Amino acid sequence: MIKPLDSSMIIQESGIHFGTSGARGLVADFKPEVCAAFCLSFIQVMQQSYSFNRIALGIDNRPSSPDLAAACIAAANAIGVEVDYYGVIPTPALAVTSMEDKIPAIMVTGSHIPFDRNGLKFYRPDGEISKEDEISILAVNTTLPSFKVLPLPRVQIKAVENYLARYFNVFSTDLLKGKHIGIYEHSSAGRDLYTMLFEKLGATVFTLGRSDSFVPIDTEAVSLADIEIAQNWQREYQLDAIFSTDGDGDRPLLTDEIGNYLRGDVLCLLAAQYLNIEALAVPVSCNSSIEVCEAFNTVRRTKIGSPYVIAEFQDLIRSSDRVAGFEANGGFLLGSDIVVNGATLSALPTRDAVLPALAVLAMAGKGTISGLVKRLPNIFTASDRIQNFPREQSLLVIEKGLSEPLLVLSQLGLGDLNAVKYDVTDGLRMTLNNGEVVHLRPSGNAPELRCYVEANSQNRAQELVRLVLNNIENMQV
């Protein structure tokens, strides 16, 4: 039995912090009492605005996730709150069902971060919690009751069924007829349902790359090994596309028919066009093609992180009927109910991997995905990260970039260029006098420095991001 303790003090001393998407930290720091403190603080904040007697909970395939889930369930049960346990499931599938049931939800996931870390992502009955909710959760000061961590309960299947039905309702069963689609399964939380989804929509499916160990796929920094594997699969099976996701199934990866992975913001830009979205909210790191293509009435730029994108929806809905947002990692957020193929697709204000992929495949029809991409403005992006790079050091690099821009550009190997525009919405985004963009920011989820660039060719973008990150590693700050 766990003895009574103060929740606020437990959280403060835990080393677990809210990042851009939920509370994240080392597995070693997610002790049972820490999970319980977050769970009960979240429930208490939700009880101030909503009436409920149960919550929903799901997990990803990380080896540590079942233990975190068991602690959360035990804590909720200790105060008389029941838990609908959905087991391993994509985050958006959990969100769909908790919103339908009008109850809060907790997703145990670290998404793409290394397996020695994990996280808790929280949902109100109407979608993701806000940054204000995060502050409220941290401010709760309550005594944890005694609780006993028990084996996990029986897995319920309703959330999977609801998630699949969401797309069967708006896309026809012959949508992908004649298409050969590869599903790169690795350790994705949705790997067991994607085959059902794509086959039901008419595709011939090839399951690929299933892994018994956790694979931390980052859709913003796809490894060269994963790119080469995809291209080999494409040739071997003559695939029209390969679909995959990050660990918790809310960020997509989709290749064209050649085996090239689409950048997340390019994928979502095409999806938004297919869905006839009128108003978009996107982070500052997304491709400038969004504005240049002139497909949308309104585009709002935000800080990086789904809570900031979602925060813009309330204002956009006042003047637009079809509202959405997305991130550079490919997660698509539907901000309003919309009609697709004559059927209503309900709002889902959290990242989703399935909708943008199906929308682009539908948009391509009998044509090719690469053909769709070629119609977009010639603005190419690339991104990568330096791992195990302390946040404090990232902030010093950014501060130096603002105070001594010419010196920093020289240290980055760009001494022949000048910065003509600065954007500090999130990190430091510099537009250079040759039209290229270099954007630096510390990750909100892990000790990493991320770099996003824009250039007039994909080769130059990849060369630029490598140049910048290699020089930062050697920079004296």
Image (tube, rainbow, N blue to C red):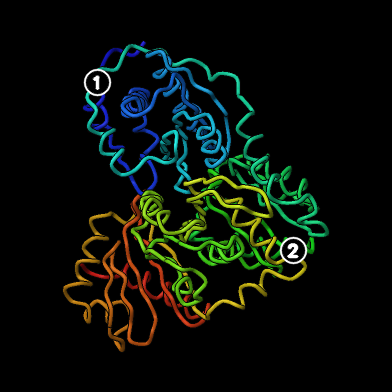
Residue at 33%, 82% (x, y): give it.
432
Q: Quadrant of the C terminus?
A: bottom left
In this view, the residue farthest toward the left is 403
Q: Nearer the viewer, residue 222 or 356?
A: 356
Question: Quick one: label 1, few (<14), some, or many (20+) residues within 10 Å?
Answer: some
Tag 1 secondary structure: loop
- Residue 358, image x, y percentages: 66, 55
Name above or below for residue 211 compared with residue 103: below
Q: Nearer the viewer, residue 37 or 385?
A: 37
Left or right: residue 428 compared with residue 115 = left
The three-letter amino acid code for the residue at tag 1 is Thr
In this view, the residue farthest toward the right is 178
Q: Name the residue carrying label 1.
A: 142
- Residue 168, image x, y percentages: 71, 45
Left or right: residue 226 compared with residue 105 = right
Q: CA distance from mark 2 to mark 1?
A: 54 Å
Residue at 79%, 64% (x, y): give it.
238
Number of callouts in the render? 2
Q: Are marks 2 and 1 in contact (CB under 8 Å)?
A: no
The three-letter amino acid code for the residue at tag 2 is Asp
Tag 2 secondary structure: loop
Mark linked to residue 240: 2
Residue at 50%, 54% (x, y): give it.
218
Q: Based on the displayed image, in which of its 4 quarters is residue 392 positioned?
A: bottom left
- Residue 418, image x, y percentages: 28, 85
Q: Which mark sits nearer the N-terminus, 2 or 1? A: 1
Left or right: residue 142 compared with residue 355 = left
Question: Quick one: label 2, few (<14), some, or many (20+) residues within 10 Å?
Answer: many
Q: Based on the displayed image, in which of its 4 quarters is residue 312 positioned?
A: bottom left
Q: Nearer the viewer, residue 401 or 123?
A: 123
Mark linked to residue 113: none
